[in-house]
Image: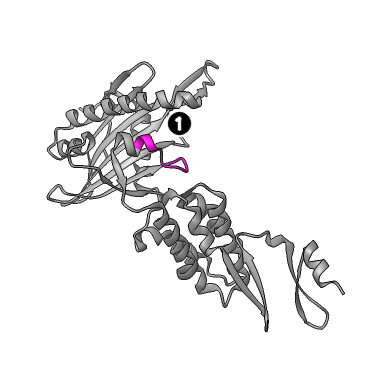
Amino acid sequence: MKNENELVIPLGIQYTSLHHIDHNTGIITAIDIDSQSEALRQYIERLLADIKERNSKRSFIFNSNTTEIRSSITLFMSEDYEKATEINAKRLLKVEQEAQEDMDKLNISIQKGSLFQTIINVDIETKMIIIGKADHNDFLDASDFAIHRGLPWKKRIFKSFLAITDHQNNIKKVLVSDTTNALTKYWWHSFLELTEERTDSHNTKKFLEIIDRKVLDRIKDKFPADHTILRNSVIGHFRSQADFDLDNMFTPIFENYPPIENDFPINDIQSRIKEIPEKYNLDSQFQIDKKEINKRAVHKVVLNEGMELLLNGAPDLDKITAFVDNENNKYIAIKSEEGYKRFKK
């Protein structure tokens, strides 16, 4: 008879392990998942769903086929799960201890966390290997009003590695994701020993180019006001952020955008933005190269014959007002001290 508390592995999951990593004490604690509560099973399922469904990811390649993590993938594929997960847990502890020594100089602490490792049968030919670290957070327990440390239930904070293999156990794709805006370097560089497949400069240049030419140019003639607002918002986002995260850009600019025109195709625009990484082979999480922004920051608006308005960067559009007079003449007014001095009559 089945134990009520036994973990029910969802269809497709072949193996899952959990280790608590404490780099301060140097202790690794392996957790027997099957003996834990239903809540832990639900947490693991939600975490795996978060990792698989997260839009913001970056493609990497292994530095070599002999690194510890790459070797552990081979062990996963040969079903030597315990050895593979133990190698990775010990490596993460070592890397976090070394990284903490460097961060002590900056008075920064690496969050303690739990290492999840899972192998999933996607279909007959494809497997997915996930290695994820979920950060622990402090919380005040309502039952005893004491501060406890544990895994946050709703807002899961994690770093993840996802490898997809084919029927011959070749690695087809490696993706890394981080719920912080920036990809944590000790995770992908020191622990996983990876190299970015595409440069930050390439990602920045192509992402801006595609949003501008493939997405927003489609609405420029029919919806010029919406085009100006959205383009200005995109340039402003790239200029104000050090790191790009597709989810963090999409929500404030496109998901919550209130169109000027009633028939504005907002759903089509949103779909085109979300499909950019896969359709154009780009990363959805990377460091923004500011030099590439300046090349696309200038936008010309033709006003009249021989007269253009030059928008450079992401100007404050609230300083520009459009209005119509009683004779249906259309104007714009620009709040400008210098402009007033130059054109006053």
Residue 90 lies within the magenta run: no
In the visual, does 112 lie left or right of 253?
left
Seen in the picture, residue 193 relative to 197 is either above or below; the reply is above
Rendered residue at 57%/50% (across/down): 240
Q: Nearer the viewer, residue 6 or 68?
A: 68
Q: Amino acid at mark 1?
A: Pro
Q: Nearer the viewer, residue 18 or 248?
A: 248
Seen in the picture, residue 69 relative to 287 is either above or below; the reply is above
Q: Visible in this render: residue 258?
A: yes
Rendered residue at 41%/38% (across/down): 184
The residue identified by callout 1 is: 152
In the visual, does 45 lie left or right of 308?
left
In the visual, does 51 lie left or right of 69?
right
Q: In what quadrant of the picture does the N terminus appear?
A: top left
The picture places residue 132, in percent across and down from the top left corner, at 33, 36
The picture places residue 174, in percent across and down from the top left corner, at 28, 47
Q: Residue furthest right?
A: 345
The picture places residue 277, in percent across and down from the top left corner, at 38, 58
Seen in the picture, residue 297 relative to 181 is either above or below; the reply is below
Rendered residue at 63%/66% (across/down): 311
Q: Nearer the viewer, residue 223 or 94?
A: 94
Q: Nearer the viewer, residue 338 or 91?
A: 338
The picture places residue 85, in percent across and down from the top left corner, at 23, 30
User: What span is colored magenta in the figure?
Assistant: 179-187
